[in-house]
Amino acid sequence: MSTAPIAFTGISSFSNDFQTILNRTVSIASLPLKQLQNSDNDAIQKKLLLGNLSSSINDLANSLSSLGTVSSGNALSASTSNSALATISNTGATSGASYTISSITSLATAANETSASGYADSLTAPVSSTGTVKLVIGSTSYTINLTPQTNNLLGLENAINQLGAPVSANILTTGTGATPNYLTLSATTTGATNLQLFDDPTGANNNLVSSLNQGTNANFQLNGVAVSRSSNTINDLVGGAIFTINGVTTGTQTATLALAPDRSQFTSPIQTFVDKYNSLVDQVNAQVGSAAGLLSGDPIVVQLQGALRSLLTYQGKGAIKNLSDLGVQSDSSGKLSFDSTALSAFTDSQVTDAFKFFGSATSGFGGLSSSFTQLSDPVTGFIKTEQNNYDQRDKNLQTQIGALSTRISTLQSNLSAQLQAADAQIAGLNNQQAILNGELQSLSLVLFGKKS
């Protein structure tokens, strides 16, 4: 907010001087206003700088947590010798293991049956002799009562689909023969089950559908032990791992499934950590030294410098003592670089020690993320608290700026009015002087015959 200058429109010979007086007075009165505006701009810029810092701090904290997460899972990688037969995925296993799947005699399939006989019409041909049918799915049964209007294929299809049972009904029309319409029942889940549909369940109890495809379980051997499951995706055999059965074996075929430490799983998270660290260091360095920015001396910057140093000085308890043992080096400017070939040369023992070094998302090197999240937390973080303070400062300064601007505008208006009045009086006096001078000159001509 600023005060617009008023152009002084005087008519006296001193009007330019009055304009100068007006401009100088307003300029002097505006000096405190400019100071307030500069302070407000600084507060806004500091808040923005803190926001940028918070984003970079959060990125670094996430990279530390990711390192801890990979480490807590021992960087296990899943592999299979024959993906056409079976695969494995790691869902939380913390130790390596190898499994052999063989003798896959069947995959899990869903039960799917068709009515034993066809119907001439899906709207008029009755499907039940009594109007009562019973749907059986596994050990659960559902009784369906059909009215004369719904005792047909369409009515039965709708009634079954409205049960909320794990089965779907559809009408199959072949288009040939005198009875081209059939009812199909399909279980919505895989596995061997009992899928039947009985007409007159308390009497003739006649099964209306075939019993050719009652579904199958996935049947195989895991390390020589027979296993049968209703799904091809199996998550209850081994803790932290999921097996997926993809095909049946022929002859002596087997699939070896393994969870083993994978050094390469560390490469990307470490590089990400290095990149996020360097990005944050650049922002911190811009706020310290002789060319420091607006956050010079800010407690957040000071605390952040300490947190960054704690990363470089962190000491592990195993053979991997520090970041340099992992191929991470620091240069004279405090920036990091990463040589990924160091990891590829690790022995299994060194990989295990790397797990100990990184710890988890809450312990070890990965646990150092907490010293950064306490700064960047969007609700309780120190940066958020300081930003809130700058918001309040901005609000207070805007109030002061508004009040001072109003006073300056009033001063300008009042002074302008006073100067206009003075200018008008001087202009009047100038006119009177000119008249008087003219009269004196006229009198001189009359008395002396010349101007005096």
Image (cartoon, rainbow, N blue to C red):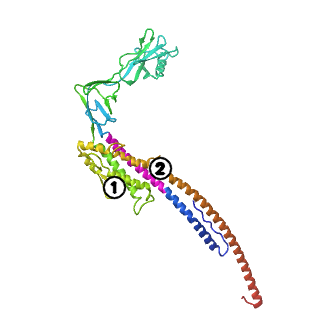
Residue furthest out toward the front: 317
Q: Nearer the viewer, residue 358 or 282?
A: 358
Q: Describe the element under mark 1 as helix, strand or loop.
A: loop
Instruction: Let me know if residue 49 is in the magenta part.
Output: yes
Q: Nearer the viewer, residue 410 or 207?
A: 410
Q: Quarter-wise, where is residue 187 in the image?
A: top left
The residue that appears at 26% across and 42% down in the rendered structure is 352
Name the residue carrying label 1. 335
First in sequence, mark 1 or 2: give its number. 1
Disc ID at residue 224: none
Q: Position of residue 284 (x, y in %)?
A: 40, 56
Residue 138 rendering spot, x and y as whole percentages: 39, 19
**Dot 1, how many residues are within 10 Å of its Cα: few (below 14), some (14-19), or many (20+)?**
some
Q: Is residue 330 visible?
A: yes
Q: Quadrant of residue 360?
A: top left
The foreground one among 392 and 81 is: 392
Spatial CA distance of label 1 from label 2 is 27 Å
Mark 2 neighbour density, 10 Å: few (under 14) some (14–19) many (20 or more): many
Q: Give the structural element (helix, strand or loop) at label 2.
A: helix
Q: Residue furthest top?
A: 203
The quarter of the picture where the C terminus appears is bottom right
Instruction: From the viewer's perspective, tell me whether residue 146 is left or right of residue 408.
Output: left
Mark carried by residue 384: 2
The answer to whether residue 153 is above or below residue 442 is above
Q: Quadrant of the N terminus?
A: bottom right
- Residue 354 belongs to the span the image colors magenta: no
71 versus 24 height, above or below: above
Q: What are the residue bounds of the magenta stretch?
A: 45-72
Residue 264 placement (x, y as % from top left) = 28, 43
User: In the image, what residue type sits under mark 2?
Assistant: Lys
**Could you say where residue 371 lies in the image, as x and y percent from the top left?**
39, 48
Q: Is residue 8 left or right of residue 393?
A: right
